Image (cartoon, coloured by chain):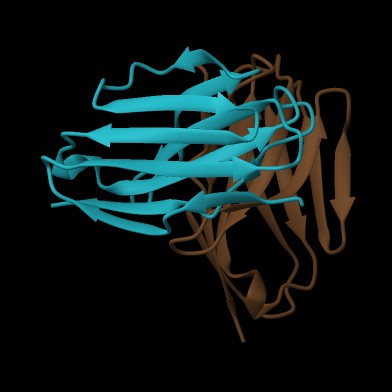
């Protein structure tokens, strides 16, 4: 069974700290992986998309890496801010037309 | 226009009611998706439409009926729902498949009483 796991489930850090969120998946033959952010009760905001041939993507303070052989992706957030507080979801597509979501990491950045 | 618009934002309905959720995009995307998300859980796929045809139905109960009248519009018709169907219903679109990622709407918060 294909599964996506995110650890830790919750994370609390002081403002300004650099942090890493982890995503692991059971089958390395993926098409794409996408990181999302979700604020409470809201929809999902796309952060970064990594296609299977790519190793990393960067946008501002965010950097996502992909290691298919080990079944892992990491989302690195530099110089965290209170506005970064949200749930971060990793989604993996194995078929080309269907994302499966991890359970998410709830991030709190303390001012 | 780079958005997926969902209406209504909130909906309360009784178990005997019939209602519809609407999702619209004008990005020229040819794939559209319905997801269901319960509190503190990840989104779960319900339906996938590709070129206005239903391509995936994840064994969703028949009280949920999707419709894709044209390439810009996706509806979810609701009938005889149960309280456990209360959730956030999310719509997403993509150019085709996941190669360019998904764009999500802000969701409809559904409460069944």
Image spot of residue B71 (x, y percent): 65, 28
Towards the viewer: B64 or A96: B64
Query: In what quadrant of the picture does the C terminus of chain A appear?
Result: bottom right
Regarding residue A60, the answer to whether it shows in the image is yes
Instruction: Tell me the residue at 46%/52% (across/down).
Output: B7
Whether residue B108 is situated above or below residue B75 in the rendered picture? below
Image spot of residue A50 (x, y percent): 80, 35
Instruction: Tell me the residue at 12%/42% (across/down).
Output: B15
Q: How many discs mark residues in the rendered view?
A: 0
Query: On the picture, is B99 further left or further right than B39?
Result: right
Towards the viewer: A64 or B111: B111
Residue A59 placement: quadrant: bottom right
Regarding residue B42, the answer to whether it shows in the image is no
Question: Which chain gets the brown colouring?
Answer: A
Residue B9 placement: quadrant: bottom left
Towards the viewer: A11 or A48: A48
- The furthest residue to the bottom: A111
Q: Chain B is shown in which shade?
A: cyan
Image spot of residue B3 (x, y percent): 68, 51
Whether residue A100 is situated above or below residue A88 in the rendered picture? above
Whether residue B9 is situated above or below residue A64 in the rendered picture? below
Image spot of residue B16 (x, y percent): 11, 40
Instruction: Tell me the residue at 56%/64% (across/down).
Output: A86
């Amino acid at each position: 069974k294909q599964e996506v796991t995110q650890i830790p489930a919750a994370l609390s850090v002081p403002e300004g700290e650099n942090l890493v969120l982890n995503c692991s998946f059971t089958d390395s033959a993926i098409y794409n992986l996408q990181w999302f952010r979700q604020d409470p009760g809201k929809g999902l905001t796309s952060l970064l998309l990594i296609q299977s041939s790519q190793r990393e993507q960067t946008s501002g303070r965010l950097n996502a890496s992909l290691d298919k052989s080990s079944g892992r992706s990491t989302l690195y957030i530099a110089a965290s801010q209170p506005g970064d507080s949200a749930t971060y979801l990793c989604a993996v597509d194995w078929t080309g037309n269907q994302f499966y979501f991890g359970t998410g990491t709830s991030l709190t950045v303390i001012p | 226009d780079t958005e997926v618009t969902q209406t209504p934002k909130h909906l309360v309905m009784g178990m005997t009611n019939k209602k519809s959720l609407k999702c619209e995009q004008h990005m020229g995307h040819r794939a559209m998706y319905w997801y269901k998300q319960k509190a503190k859980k990840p989104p779960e796929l319900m339906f996938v439409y590709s070129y206005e045809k239903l391509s995936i139905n994840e064994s969703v109960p028949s009280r949920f009926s999707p419709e894709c009248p044209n390439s810009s519009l996706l509806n979810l018709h609701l009938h005889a729902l149960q309280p456990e169907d209360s959730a956030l219903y999310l719509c997403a679109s993509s150019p085709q498949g996941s190669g360019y990622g998904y764009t999500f709407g802000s969701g409809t918060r559904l409460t069944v009483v």
